[in-house]
Image: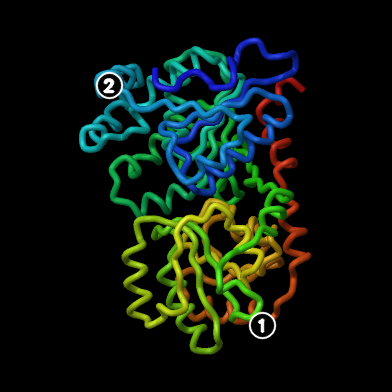
């Protein structure tokens, strides 16, 4: 099997008191959920536990950021015969929902199912935590096939209800029923915000008491170190106009068209610039809108950046323009850099991160004028760095890792 065995030793034979912990996700793409997994993996490895990060494909912007102490297991996707054989072992009601989508698309994530089940049989980790909804379902299906004692946990990072309303993908539209059928079989369900937990309970009839809220962590010490690294970008020098900074995948979820309209309003009132860090399918559309608005000289989309914190530490204001979120790691990271923050009050997460607006400004979704006014006010204030860093400390990785640990091994304490 492709990449089944860890690079840094076998999972069997751990010292007393040490645990075998696995994380499962589709890839090492540069998203918030993936960064959270790598942060938790590094923290548990630092504490002396045996940790694997299991992925369908070892690709993405975060490949270089995997800690050396954490082996990455690449499952790959076997052929359709092996995948179909594994799916046939699932309940018929699940099989008939998945099969049509397997016929129309390759579905590499789902095709990894037999290899994830094999990984569980061979390595038998004490705990496996999956993240994102499709990966969550695959982990639960693999647990059923493997029939091992591994404690399976799933983590919901995004609003499924909003996602389903904004997608034409056949599998994603079936997620609510699949989630309702399978999430209760997990040892524990984690949501990254209280709003997301409330929505999940309402959407699936899963008892709210069964859903645990654990905010996403940030490594405040590491962010502080990276924020101080040099930034070779002419717009971020001391004598330049202030920069409005956004960071996130170029996807309609982030509603960058509203941000571009807001920036066009703001630019008419004062000298400023806009930088949007990230890559994604909306690039061409956004570049066209920049040209149509006549703001090309003051807008840059530089793509994925390995160290976004150096940008955050030097920006005049950080902005989140999303239509929906799960929590928004990037808001916490901006706070950790001491950057003033403006965010849409979208479902779910930003209001919780900013404590109802105490640590940043909240504005309505898809309202360019309100966003422009809030950005101008934030640029005019130029204060609040200490308070922002203090708020970020609430989400520090040490405390969050402790909360996950309590959930993983609650029956042993």
Which residue sits furthest bottom?
269
Question: Which sits in the foreground, 127 or 315?
Answer: 315
Figure quadrant of the C terminus? top right
User: Could you tell me if residue 374 is visible in this image?
Assistant: no
User: Could you tell me if residue 142 is visible in this image?
Assistant: yes
Query: SS at mark 2?
Result: helix
Question: Which sits in the foreground, 9 or 26?
Answer: 9
Residue that badge 1 annotates: 380
Spot occupied by residue 233 in the image (x, y as percentages of width and height):
56, 68
Spot occupied by residue 355 in the image (x, y as percentages of width and height):
69, 61
Spot occupied by residue 32 in the image (x, y as percentages of width and height):
54, 48
Q: Cβ–Cβ below 8 Å for labels 1 and 2?
A: no
Residue that badge 2 annotates: 84
How busy is the neighbourhood of tag 2: few (under 14 within 10 Å), some, or many (20 plus)?
A: some
144, above or below 405, in the image:
above
Residue at 46% from the left image edge and 15% from the top image edge? 146
Mark 1 / mark 2, whichever is N-terminal: 2
Which residue sits furthest top?
13
Residue 292's image quarter?
bottom left
Residue 271's image quarter?
bottom right
Question: Which sits in the foreground, 80 or 346?
Answer: 80
Q: CA distance from mark 1 to mark 2?
A: 59 Å
Figure quadrant of the N terminus? top left
In this picture the colour scheme is rainbow
Query: SS at mark 1?
Result: helix
21, above or below 133, in the image:
above
Residue at 57% from the left image edge and 37% from the top image edge? 66
173, above or below 262, in the image:
above
Residue at 43% from the left image edge and 65% from the top image edge? 255
- The label shown at residue 70 is none
How busy is the neighbourhood of tag 1: few (under 14 within 10 Å), some, or many (20 plus)?
A: few
């Amino acid at each position: 099997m492709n990449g089944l065995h860890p690079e840094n030793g076998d999972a069997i034979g751990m010292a007393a008191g040490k645990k075998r912990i696995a994380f499962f996700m589709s890839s090492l793409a540069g998203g918030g959920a993936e960064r959270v997994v790598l942060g938790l993996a590094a923290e548990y490895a630092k504490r002396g536990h045996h940790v694997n990060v299991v992925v369908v494909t070892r690709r993405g912007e975060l490949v270089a950021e995997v800690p050396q102490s954490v082996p990455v297991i690449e499952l790959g996707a076997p052929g359709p015969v092996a995948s179909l054989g594994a799916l046939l072992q699932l309940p018929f009601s699940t099989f008939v929902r998945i099969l049509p989508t397997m016929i129309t698309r390759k579905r590499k994530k789902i095709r990894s199912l037999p290899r994830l089940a094999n990984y569980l049989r061979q390595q038998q980790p004490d705990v496996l935590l999956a993240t994102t909804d499709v990966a969550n379902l695959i982990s639960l299906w693999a647990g059923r096939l493997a029939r091992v004692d591994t404690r399976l946990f799933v983590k919901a990072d995004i609003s499924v209800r909003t996602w389903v309303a904004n997608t034409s993908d056949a599998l994603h539209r079936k997620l609510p029923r699949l989630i309702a059928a399978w999430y209760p079989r997990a040892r524990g369900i984690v949501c990254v915000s209280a709003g997301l937990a409330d929505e999940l309970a309402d959407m699936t009839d899963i008892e709210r008491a069964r859903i645990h809220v654990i905010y996403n962590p940030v490594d405040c010490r590491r962010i502080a170190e990276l924020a101080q690294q040099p930034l070779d970008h002419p717009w971020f020098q001391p004598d330049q106009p202030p920069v409005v900074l956004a960071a996130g995948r170029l996807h309609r979820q982030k509603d960058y068209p509203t941000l571009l309209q807001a920036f066009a309003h703001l630019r008419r009132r004062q000298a400023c610039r806009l930088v949007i860090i990230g890559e994604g399918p909306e690039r061409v559309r956004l570049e066209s809108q920049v040209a149509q608005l006549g703001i090309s000289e003051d807008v840059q989309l530089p793509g994925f950046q390995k160290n976004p914190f150096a940008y955050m530490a030097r920006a005049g204001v950080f902005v989140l323009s999303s239509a929906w979120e799960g929590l928004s790691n990037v808001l916490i990271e901006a706070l950790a850099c001491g950057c003033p923050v403006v965010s849409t009050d979208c479902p779910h997460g930003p209001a919780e991160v900013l404590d109802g607006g105490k640590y940043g400004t909240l504005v309505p979704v898809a309202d360019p004028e309100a966003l422009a006014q809030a950005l101008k006010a934030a640029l005019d204030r130029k204060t609040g760095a200490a308070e922002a860093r203090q708020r970020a400390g609430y989400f520090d990785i040490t405390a969050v890792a402790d909360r996950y640990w309590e959930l993983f091994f609650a029956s042993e304490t």
